[in-house]
Image (cartoon, rainbow, N blue to C red):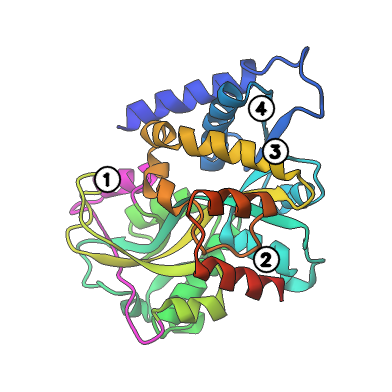
Amino acid sequence: MLNNFKQVIAAAALAVSFGFATDDASAQSRITIGTNPQGSLYYTIGGGMAAALQERLKRQVTVQPFTGSSVYLPLIAAGELTLGLNSSIDINDSYSGTGGKKPLDNLRVVARLWPLRMAFIVRADSDMRSVADLKGKRTVTEFASLAAVSQVNVATLEAAGLSVDDVEPVTVSGLSTGLEALTENQLDATSAAIGIPMVQQANAGIPGGIRYLTLEGDNATKAFFDKRLPGLYPMTVNANPRMPEITDPVVVSAFDVYLTVGADTADEDVQAILGALYDAFPQLQKDYPPLRGGAQDMMSAPTNTAPYHSGAVAYWKERGMWTDENDALEASLAN
């Protein structure tokens, strides 16, 4: 599977580099997709989406990588980029103006793509099984280059009844650094998206493999996360052949990746993009394993942290995929 995934990544990169002729496409008809840097998961999947949209819409579609969401979310809200791949946590921070920033109240979502399922990871030969067992342990709480994941780490500890002061906090640069330190037994726990290739590599490199810690406690609820870190929610993951490291059901912290757009984008453009994306989604799931956590019937899920675009609302209503829960969340976001 990993080799096949690498081949898909290479194909997507070639499509992004060479597949978009600019001679016949006007700036007005061009669709741009903002993503994280080249080599990132967002960039890879953005490349696949660009190819699928271009084929179906017969319009030029290009991927534009940036250093991070905080750089390109303002461009999406301003209409300088057509679309973006962004997490519900980053969307919430930008839309609400967390940290004293100017709110990007012109930011909208159009479709939920897939959930990123995050968990604290320990060596399987340890006696730790739940997040609460991290008390007093050397635990990665902060990633220098991943602000949203750092927020997830702290909120997950709190949901388990702990605080940063209850563990021995460790800061590392990124996911791979934390997993390497865990493999070398230099710390007790780190976090990452479950099942990704670098986690599988750590599982193979550690004698006895790894274990995901399950989230338990009175605060391990969506209601707690809605107040503490909007966009985050608990999710139960069952054992499956693609993730042999999971032998029993485990509760992890999840947040969704959305396709975002500016509010001023024309309804008809949004609906055309959604129609092409909806039709292409089953094939994209085959080509890009992370998307298999998503589903066509969950593309309008009410887990959004900025309002849906008016064109998207109309599209999902026409498909019968808009619920009273969607309406209630839209009303709360408007306020």
Whether residue 90 sits left or right of residue 241 in the image: it is right
Q: Position of residue 288 (x, y in %)?
A: 41, 35
Quadrant of the rendered image containing residue 103:
bottom right
Answer whether residue 280 is magenta in the image.
no
Residue 213 drawn at (x, y percent): 30, 68
Residue that badge 2 annotates: 93
Is 307 above or below relative to 257? below
The amino acid type found where label 3 is placed reads Asp
Relative to 96, say whether 20 is above or below: above
Q: Residue at x 62, y 43 (%)?
A: 36
Callout 2, which amino acid?
A: Asp
60 sits to left or right of 214: right
Quadrant where the image shows the N terminus: top left
Under circle 4, the secondary element is strand
Q: Could you tell whether 156 is left or right of 16 in the image? A: left
Kindly identify which numbered label has been placed on residue 61: 4
Q: Secondary structure at mark 2?
A: helix
Image height check: is 289 above or below 182? above
> What is the secondary structure assignment of the residue under circle 3?
helix
Q: Residue at x 55, y 37 (%)?
A: 275
